[in-house]
Image: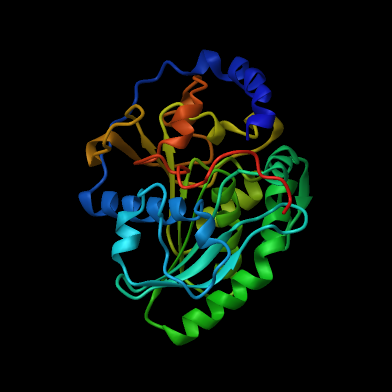
């Protein structure tokens, strides 16, 4: 997302005079906080290369130790994917027999092709809903993963009909998870959507459509993380609702009192949209250092 961060300056100028209203404090329940912690760790596990290239194995975070809740569960991946031709969409589908879950998780931006997808923000038509357009780079990333993900979820759901289905991801991965949840819901599955630091994926039509789908949406943002303010409202992009806004700083434990939500509406200045800071560290801190399992460096095509 850094490749288009310059667009925030125009957006900031547009909204700078509209942020005087007081913040409404609405803490979440401890049960919901526990869900956020668990699914943030599933999103974090998507950054670990060992979870992207070895289907049929247990999910682990061996270098970062930032997914203990996931590692404590009995999990097995049914699909792992990386290094797609155009967008390098990366992630996994896993079955969690401890928590009775089927989890679809997507990694955030880590490669040249990921950054290219981030910057590819003209809108294109989608087949998710009538008249729905979306950010081209994000949607193309989903299209490259779609066939394998849907087939894996179908097989896992058939084998485990009582398990809940969850889609999750961070940053670019959060945007892709939006499309995954929407399409699986269209196929009749109940899918809960938990995203962390998600950019906006499209205009009012697709955002309203996904917001209104059953299954539950939990769009988590962190203080003045700039990525959820991209692409700008100025270009017609709005968010899926509702938002849950972490109000604390970086590298501190998050409590239920530190999260405001649900904040409803496709544009709500009571949350992250009402901030003007450019703290990129805030984008990486969601309950822990969410991307720390990635080995670092700049990934080119293998």
Using the rendered image of the protein, determine whether residue 189 is visible from the camera's viewpoint.
yes
Q: Provide residue 101's location: percent of width, then percent of height.
A: 38, 71
Q: Is residue 99 left or right of residue 301?
A: left
Which of 8 and 213 lies nearest the eye of the viewer?
A: 8
Q: Provide residue 222's location: percent of width, then percent of height.
A: 41, 34
Q: Provide residue 280's location: percent of width, then percent of height.
A: 51, 27
Which of 113 and 161 lies nearest the eye of the viewer?
A: 113
Q: Provide residue 117's location: percent of width, then percent of height.
A: 72, 45
Q: Which quadrant would the N terminus be assigned to in this image?
A: top right
Q: From this view, report whether residue 52 is shown above or below residue 1.
A: below
Q: Which quadrant would residue 114 be assigned to in this image?
A: top right
Q: From this view, report whether residue 251 is shown above or below residue 136.
A: above
Name the residue located 68 percent from the left edge and 30 percent from the top edge.
4
Which of 229 and 131 lies nearest the eye of the viewer?
A: 229
Name the residue located 33 percent from the left edge and 72 percent from the top edge.
74
Q: From this view, report whether residue 300 is shown above or below residue 132.
A: above
Q: From this view, report whether residue 19 is shown above or below residue 245.
A: above
Using the rendered image of the protein, determine whether residue 132 is visible from the camera's viewpoint.
no
Q: Which quadrant would the C terminus be assigned to in this image?
A: bottom right
Name the residue located 40 percent from the left edge and 47 percent from the top edge.
64
Which of 169 and 73 lies nearest the eye of the viewer?
A: 73
Colour pattern of the rendering: rainbow
Q: Is residue 46 left or right of residue 285?
A: right
Q: Which quadrant would residue 237 be assigned to in this image?
A: top right
């Amino acid at each position: 997302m850094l490749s288009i961060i310059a667009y925030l300056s125009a957006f900031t100028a547009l909204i700078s005079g509209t942020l005087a209203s007081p913040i409404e404090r609405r803490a979440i329940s401890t049960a919901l906080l526990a869900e956020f912690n668990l699914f943030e760790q599933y999103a974090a596990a998507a950054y670990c290369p060992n979870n992207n290239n070895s289907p049929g194995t247990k999910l682990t975070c061996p270098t970062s130790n930032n997914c203990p809740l996931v590692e404590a569960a009995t999990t097995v991946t049914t699909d792992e994917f990386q290094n797609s031709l155009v967008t390098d969409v990366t992630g996994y589908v896993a079955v969690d027999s401890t928590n009775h879950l089927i989890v679809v998780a997507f990694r955030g931006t880590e490669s040249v092709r990921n950054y290219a997808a981030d910057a590819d923000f003209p809108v294109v038509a989608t087949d998710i809903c009538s008249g729905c357009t979306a950010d081209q780079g994000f949607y193309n990333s989903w299209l490259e993963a779609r066939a394998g993900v849907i087939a894996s979820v179908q097989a896992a759901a058939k084998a485990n009909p009582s398990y809940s289905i969850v889609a999750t991801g961070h940053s670019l991965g959060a945007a892709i998870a939006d499309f995954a949840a929407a399409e699986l819901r269209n196929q009749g599955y109940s899918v809960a959507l938990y995203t962390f630091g998600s950019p906006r994926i499209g205009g009012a039509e697709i955002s309203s459509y996904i917001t209104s789908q059953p299954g539950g949406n939990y769009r988590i943002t962190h203080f003045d993380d700039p990525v959820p303010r991209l692409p700008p409202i100025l270009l017609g992009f709005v968010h899926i609702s509702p938002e849950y806004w972490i109000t604390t700083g970086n590298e501190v434990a998050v409590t239920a009192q530190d999260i405001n939500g649900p904040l409803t509406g496709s544009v709500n200045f009571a949350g992250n949209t009402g901030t003007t800071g450019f703290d990129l560290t805030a984008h990486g801190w969601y309950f822990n250092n969410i991307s720390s399992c990635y080995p670092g460096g700049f990934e080119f095509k293998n």
